[in-house]
């Protein structure tokens, strides 16, 4: 009985009919014939309502529903959700589905209205675009069912509650792979690229023949064999590439619903995938006041899963980042020359100068790429028409900040530090292009 009471609702059509009958009863005081007719109509309404309720409750599970969720959500991308419906009633039903989507989307009126014929099956689709990583909880689906009479409604609580983890953007990895490897497979001619520095792995010791580099002579082997022996090397194919994410307060700034930290996290997953596809070793780490989320650069099958799991729950701590700690830990942990892609943000030249000594120290042993962000809101302010004195002042100040970004780029270049200054939405593509450019030029 309690279940019946909790799931039964009378529709607005029923109350409209009651209101109309009340008016007819009032008029019936003056017109006796109309009073008798109204009593008949009232009995008919009650009878139809009871019939409607019996139709709805005659079958215990008149509606079948199944929610189809992905294994995990992709941050910043459209994630497709499906709901499969089946009408087991022997008549046409009107349905209102209220989906209990995770609270992070802040939608309390996520409603679908549908009409299903008898025994009809239908699949509904909708997309959700998460803007932050973490755990998303999907609740039940409340289905309100009415017959063609639409005098009463039965509530069905369907769908299982389920938790999904939201990971950095992984849905577009295939798209980036396609772009990278399609473009690299097109040949427009051959040109020699000058390799800077040595990146060689020992292969074997062999007898000296005319033309071998005498600098590779192995004197110990020569003494043992009483003939000239040389070390033979092969070009090293697997280079180490580390993406470093600044978790400080500078990365909390938001553009188009995503923080700079989230843009950096998404880009890290994408470029790590490309690095491994290019036969290099991908690794990552994060830092703020201390170094965290350390994944050693490798090219194993499980590497992408390790990086994705490490990126899953990265949060900023709203503190000033300690680049000194970053330098000391990198010097201690990364022994071989590697490509370090540092995602951070500098707004002023003074902010850079406080950390420049540590960046220069890192650049002595590694190839450092500093990736930081343009302020797209300042760009739109500069490009907008200045109608008032205040807007002129705002435009001049915006230009000053944009000029500071260019000064930062030039200052880093003076010390041989590579840079990528990019709009947040173009971060992934521009970072991948920079990696491919450095690799093609043999700089690491």
Image: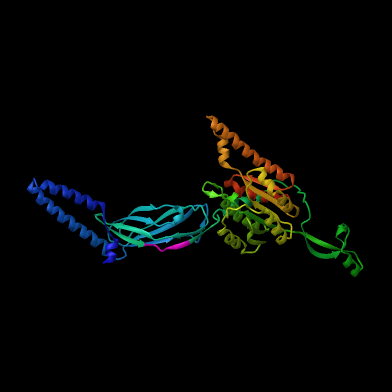
User: Considering only vertical position in the picture, is 54 above or below 374?
Assistant: below
As drawn, the residue found furthest toward the left would be 32
Give the left or right position of residue 320, taking residue 211 as reference. Answer: left
Residue 314 position, x and y percent, is: 57, 57
Q: Nearer the viewer, residue 78 or 166?
A: 166
Tell me the quarter of the picture where residue 2 sits: bottom left
Residue 296 visible in the displayed image:
yes
Image quadrant holding the N terminus, namely bottom left
Q: Residue at x 18, y 48 (%)?
A: 20
Segment colored magenta: 158-163
Give the image location of residue 48, x and y in percent.
19, 57
Q: Position of residue 419 (x, y in %)?
A: 68, 46
Q: Residue at x 67, y 46 (%)?
A: 352
**Identity of the residue furthest to the bottom in this view:** 224
Viewer-side residue, 88 vs 324: 324
- How has the structure been colored for display? rainbow
Residue 24 location in percent, x, y? 14, 48
What is the count of numbered marks?
0
Q: Nearer the viewer, residue 191 or 372?
A: 372
Pick the residue in front: 65 or 284. Answer: 284
Instruction: Find the residue positioned furthest to the right.
Output: 226
Residue 160 on the magenta segment: yes
The residue depicted at 42 percent of the width and 54 percent of the height is 125
Indicate yes or no whether the magenta region holds residue 107.
no
- The answer to whether any part of residue 239 appears in the image is no
Relative to 5, 139 lies left or right: right
């Amino acid at each position: 009985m309690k279940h019946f009471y909790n799931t039964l609702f009378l529709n607005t059509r029923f109350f409209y009919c009651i209101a109309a009958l009340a008016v007819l009863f009032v008029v019936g005081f003056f017109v006796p014939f109309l009073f008798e007719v109204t009593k008949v109509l009232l009995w008919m309404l009650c009878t139809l309502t009871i019939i409607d309720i019996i139709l709805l409750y005659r079958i215990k599970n008149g509606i079948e529903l199944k929610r189809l969720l992905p294994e995990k959500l992709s941050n910043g991308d459209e994630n497709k959700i499906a709901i499969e419906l089946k009408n087991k009633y022997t008549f046409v039903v009107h349905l209102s589905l209220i989906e209990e989507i995770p609270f992070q989307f802040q939608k309390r009126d996520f409603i679908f209205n549908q009409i299903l014929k008898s025994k009809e099956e239908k699949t509904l689709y909708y997309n959700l675009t998460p803007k932050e990583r973490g755990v998303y909880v999907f609740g039940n689906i409340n289905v309100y069912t009415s017959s063609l009479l639409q005098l009463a409604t039965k509530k069905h609580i369907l769908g299982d509650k389920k938790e999904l983890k939201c990971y950095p953007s992984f849905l577009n990895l295939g798209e980036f792979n396609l772009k990278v490897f399609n473009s690299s497979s097109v040949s427009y001619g051959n040109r020699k690229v000058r390799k800077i520095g040595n990146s060689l792995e020992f292969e074997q010791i062999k007898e000296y023949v005319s033309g071998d580099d005498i600098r590779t002579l192995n004197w110990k082997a020569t003494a043992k064999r009483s003939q000239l022996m040389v070390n033979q090397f092969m070009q090293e194919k697997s280079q180490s590439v580390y993406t470093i994410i600044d978790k400080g307060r500078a990365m909390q700034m938001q553009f188009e619903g995503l923080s700079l930290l989230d843009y950096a996290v998404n880009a890290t997953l994408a470029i790590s995938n490309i690095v491994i596809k290019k036969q290099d070793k991908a690794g990552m780490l994060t830092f703020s006041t201390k170094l965290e989320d350390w994944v050693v650069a490798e090219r194993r099958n499980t590497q992408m899963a390790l990086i994705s799991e490490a990126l899953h729950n990265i949060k900023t701590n709203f503190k000033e980042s300690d680049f000194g700690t970053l330098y000391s830990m990198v010097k201690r942990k990364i022994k071989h020359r590697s490509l370090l892609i540092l995602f951070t943000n500098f707004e002023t030249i003074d902010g850079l100068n406080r950390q420049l000594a540590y960046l220069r120290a890192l650049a002595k042993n590694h190839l450092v790429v500093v990736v930081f962000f343009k302020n797209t809101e300042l760009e739109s302010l500069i490009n907008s028409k200045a109608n008032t004195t205040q807007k002129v002042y705002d435009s001049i100040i915006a230009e000053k900040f944009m000029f500071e970004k260019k000064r930062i780029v030039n200052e880093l270049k003076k010390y041989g530090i590579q840079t990528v200054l990019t709009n947040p939405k173009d971060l992934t593509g521009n970072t991948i292009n920079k990696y491919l450019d450095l690799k093609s030029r043999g700089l690491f």
